[in-house]
Amino acid sequence: MTSDWAHCGTSKSPRNYTRTVAHTTKTKASGRERERAWTMVSYVSVLLYGVGGIVVAGMALLVAFQEKLVYVPVLPGLTKSYPITPARLRLMYEDVWLRSSDGVRLHAWFIKLFPECRGPTILFFQENAGNIAHRLEMVRIMIQRLQCNVFMLSYRGYGASDGYPSQHGITMDAQAALDHLSQRIDIDTSRIVVFGRSLGGAVGAVLTKNNPDKVAALILENTFTSILDMAGVLLPFLKWFIGGSGSKGPRILNCLVRSPWSTIDIIGEITQPILFLSGLQDEMVPPFHMQMLYAKAAARNRQCIFVEFPTGMHMDTWLAGGDNYWKTIQLFFEQNVPEQTEIQSSHNDNDSEEAR
């Protein structure tokens, strides 16, 4: 019998035909897979370019507007002006106007326990947000508990001070405030203590290091190691591009940061007594920053004290710490900035013993 394949005019056997169809089907499937693969590559490329573009744009904005991220003179919903003055809390105070070394006009409040108070004078440096009026309630209690005077400086761009904030500028502002206090005749200038919280701690550390003959002691509360390290805490995607000495990333953007406030590089050079007050529930600055600062300072300075407050958060450690908070500072004062009468009495006792 003649094969049907022969009648059809083909020389292909059923087996060869099956192979041909299978090959054709496989070729078409392979083509579709390549198309899908190229489509996937295209989508991924677009996605990567898009994400990369967003990251680059975001970093450009961060670099361009970093001062607005680091310094927040005006709290959301409020104005730059002071909501209250010390008079509202019945505090005795003086409006002080200063000129920074670059000519910027600065404002401060000098709040005294009483007119001729010779107790310690605290040069207070605030956190980055708001102005000095927002710290008045804490300062009111500070004056009562510590029997001290408090000088509250408004950084440039904050409160009633002129100018715009920057690390270089605020460093000059702090120096102007200290120079003013050092020239006053109504206080004991040998008992000037710098107190800084958060950003204020970074400001105070620089000032204390630069003025060993004018600053008797330093108090740091919930202060960061550096803005470089904080960038990775507040904006995690930046930790690969910005970071301190402990960072594992390439840190390629460090050179573009204009306000690094690297307290960790300053603290080891301070020779005066330092009190570290750390709130363990700090939601802004990780508590290990304070531990690192203490370790760096204590390695060279034996006059360092570290005190933890288990329930203290970033802004309310003074409140959460209660009586223990104020007693800690009071003891620090007694040990490191005693009254002149006590020093004189000690000298007299020594002279009497030598005479015997």
Image (cartoon, helix red, strand yellow):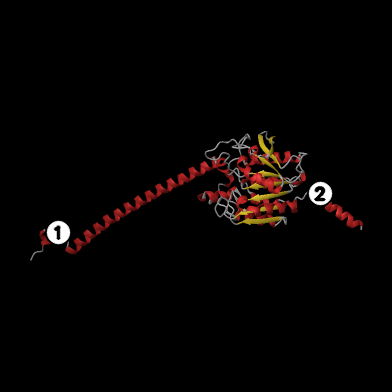
Asked which quadrant contains residue 133, the reply is: top right
Chain-order first, disc 2 or disc 1: 1
Query: Which residue is the extreme one toward the left?
Result: 1
Estimate the x, y position of residue 244 in percent, counting from the top left: 59, 51
Q: Is 134 situated above or below 310? A: above
User: Which label number is shown at residue 341?
Assistant: 2
Tell me the SS state at disc 1: loop
Is disc 1 surrounded by few (<14), some (14 to 19) or many (20+) residues within 10 Å?
A: few
Estimate the x, y position of residue 65 in percent, counting from the top left: 54, 40
Q: Quadrant of the N terminus?
A: bottom left
Estimate the x, y position of residue 52 in percent, counting from the top left: 46, 47
Query: Which residue is the extreme one toward the bottom?
Result: 1
Residue type at the position of mark 2: Thr
Asked which quadrant contains residue 126, the reply is: top right
Give the left or right position of residue 312, taking residue 174 as reference: left
Q: Nearer the viewer, mark 2 or mark 1?
A: 2
Q: Residue at coordinates 19% horizontally, 64% vertically from top-left?
A: 15
User: Which label number is shown at residue 10?
Assistant: 1
Q: Is 146 situated above or below 77? A: below
Give the left or right position of residue 281, taking residue 265 as reference: left
Estimate the x, y position of residue 308 in percent, counting from the top left: 63, 56
Does the image show residue 331? yes
Q: How many marks?
A: 2
Most foreground residue, 258 or 344 = 344
Does the image show residue 209? no
User: Which label number is shown at residue 356?
Assistant: none
